[in-house]
Each structure stands twice: as structure tokens, then as C-alpha cells.
Amino acid sequence: MDRNSSRRQVAAMKQSLFDQGHLDEQFIQLEELQDDANPNFVEEIVTLYYRDSSRLISNLEQSLERNPLDFNKLDNIMHQFKGSSSSIGAKKVKAECTLFKEYCRTGNAEGCRKSFQQLKKEYAALRKKLEAYFQLARQVGSHETACRPNTILPLFPRKTTLSIMILKSKAQLLL
């Protein structure tokens, strides 16, 4: 496969992540912060996300096993998870976090449990797809990652730029 067709394959793979609703505009904003000085920035941020969120998932699992459920504690943990998911543009995961938080607000234990199972499915599906995307992008050596997908996405104001800069600082401190 030649380099141009490989790059098209990377672009098509990313496009499918948007078309299937797995990612939102925040992912593009992260990619825009990637440069020659830190060409793996987005992958590093996503790796940090999965490392931190696995701890949150474990905390949620433990909290969901307790009887009665502490909805405030569950909501607080999910709030952290939702924020982390938002920071990488994990659209479906974030939506499931929102639903879970609503079940916490209404005291719906069964809804929390079902939503959590769906959240874990979305989380695992996104992880698998992003791992494949990053692997292919590394093979191609693609620096065209910040290209916007073909879908019509609203351009959000840069209100999230500060949180991205904080993430970038954290990533550099950990390196």
C-alpha cells in the first residue's frame, strides 16, 4: 500500500469514528495542539485518560455493589469520569455518563446499573477503535491528524482550550 492510500485509510478511519458518533469536536481540538515537538500528544492524552478512567470504573463497580447505593458518591465519581471523557471528545461515553448521572439524581439503582454496563461497552469499543487508529497513524507517520472530518460539526468557541492546556502540561510532567 502506498503512502497516500495509507494516509487516506487513516483519514477514513478517523472519519468513521465521527460518523459513528464515538468522537466529537474536542478530539479535533486536541489534535490541533499536537505539533512536531510532541507528535504523539493526542495518543499520550488518550493513554492518560484510559489509565485514570480504569481507576474510576473500578471505584464505580465497587460502589454499585454496595447496598444501599450511595447516589451522591456515584454521581461524584461519574462527574469525574464525564469530565475526563469530555476532554478527549469521547461522545458516546460522555452521553452514557450523563444518563448515569440522571439515574443518580432520581435514585434509580437499576437504571444506574444498566447505564454502567452500557458505558463500559462504549468505553471498550472506543478504546479498541482508538488503538487501531493510533497504530495505523504511527505506521503511516501521519501528521495530518488535525484535519477536520467531512461531517458538519459546529465550531465551538475555544472555551475548552484552558482545560486542554492543563492536560498538555500534565502530560509533559509525566514524561
Image (tube, helix red, strand yellow):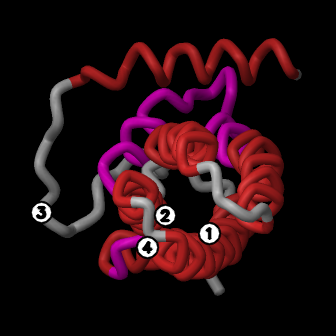
Classify mark 1: residues with Cα within 10 Å, few (<14), some (14-19) or many (20+): many
In this view, the residue in front, 80 or 24, is 80
Quadrant for the C terminus in the image: top right
Task: State which mark lies toward you, 4 or 1.
Answer: 1
Can residue 23 be seen from the camera position used here?
no
Q: Which residue is mark 3?
A: 152
Question: Could you say which disc has been placed on residue 17 in the image?
Answer: 4
61 is higher (above) or lower (below) than 17 = above
Task: State which mark lies toward you, 3 or 2.
Answer: 2
Q: Are marks 3 and 2 in contact (CB under 8 Å)?
A: no
Q: Earlier in the sequence, mark 4 or mark 3?
A: 4
Q: Earlier in the sequence, mark 1 or mark 3?
A: 1
Residue located at (63% from left, 27% from top): 36
Q: Secondary structure at mark 4?
A: helix
Quadrant for the N terminus in the image: bottom right
Q: Earlier in the sequence, mark 3 or mark 2?
A: 2
The amino acid beneath tag 4 is Leu
The residue at the far bottom in this view is: 1
Q: Secondary structure at mark 2?
A: helix
Residue located at (86% from left, 20% from top): 174
Residue located at (48% from left, 27% from top): 33
Residue range in magenta is 20-46
Q: Are marks 2 and 1 in contact (CB under 8 Å)?
A: yes
Residue located at (67% from left, 21% from top): 37
In this view, the residue in front, 67 or 13, is 67
The x and y percentages for residue 144 are 47, 50
Q: Secondary structure at mark 1?
A: helix
The amino acid beneath tag 1 is Tyr
The amino acid beneath tag 2 is Val
Q: Which residue is mark 1?
A: 123
Q: Is residue 174 magenta?
A: no
Q: Give the left or right position of residue 60, taking residue 95 as reference.
A: right
